[in-house]
Amino acid sequence: MTTFHGPVEAEPGVLVHSRRDREVGAETWLVLAARDAREARKEWSAYGVALLRCGTVFSAVRIPADIVHAAAGTADRVKVAAYLETALDGGPCFFDGSSQAFYALTPHSTARRWDVPDTEALGADFFLGVPATTISDPDPRCAAWWVVPIDGPAALCDPDIVRWLVQRGRIRRSEAAAEEAGEDA
């Protein structure tokens, strides 16, 4: 059996890249944000996560899990992942169990103009533990995994879509709190 690992021509003039090709491309692009690319790759291999500097090739918007769960209407991991895949239009997002937050990767300039309550955009001077591109489920090496994997170099979330997601989650969270308060009365 012959295994081919390069791009495939789906129809004349259209190349299709395998998921692994896109992971490698995304990884190569992400390590541009590392102090030392070789060290970042070693950290991903050993620990499943590497510290990358925000505000260089990407920014990250930290969204508390309760806001994402409210937006999705569930805390079920699989259902939240499916919701985020659609809501973020395929933009990359990972979950960090240590901080109980989701991190949507956005263009590097996002942090300079981000003003959405209950969230924080991490830009220049922030270092973020980013999971290896191959980790898309809980992993014993680290507390972070890709909920919506990065699909290739510079494939980032649209900040306006992230803003919409957060606003939807905040509204649904407020509605649930008001409904709960009404039931308690």
Image (cartoon, grey):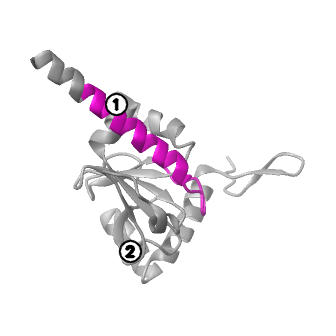
Q: Is residue 76 in sight in this rendering?
A: no
- The mark nearer the N terminus, 2 or 1, is 2
Q: Is residue 150 visible?
A: yes
Mark 2 touches mark 1? (CB < 8 Å): no
Q: Is residue 183 left or right of residue 122?
A: left
Depth check, front residue: 15 or 90:
90
Q: Residue at x 35, y 73 (%)?
A: 126
**Residue sitting at x 59%, y 50%:** 19
Classify the position of the C terminus by image quarter: top left
Is residue 160 magenta-colored?
A: yes
Which stretch did the figure color magenta? 148-176
Q: Please give the residue where the numbered disc 2 appears in the rendered image.
A: 42
Percent position (x, y) of residue 183? 15, 16
Q: Which mark is residue 159?
A: none
Q: Secondary structure at mark 2?
A: helix
Residue at 25%, 51% in the rendered image:
97
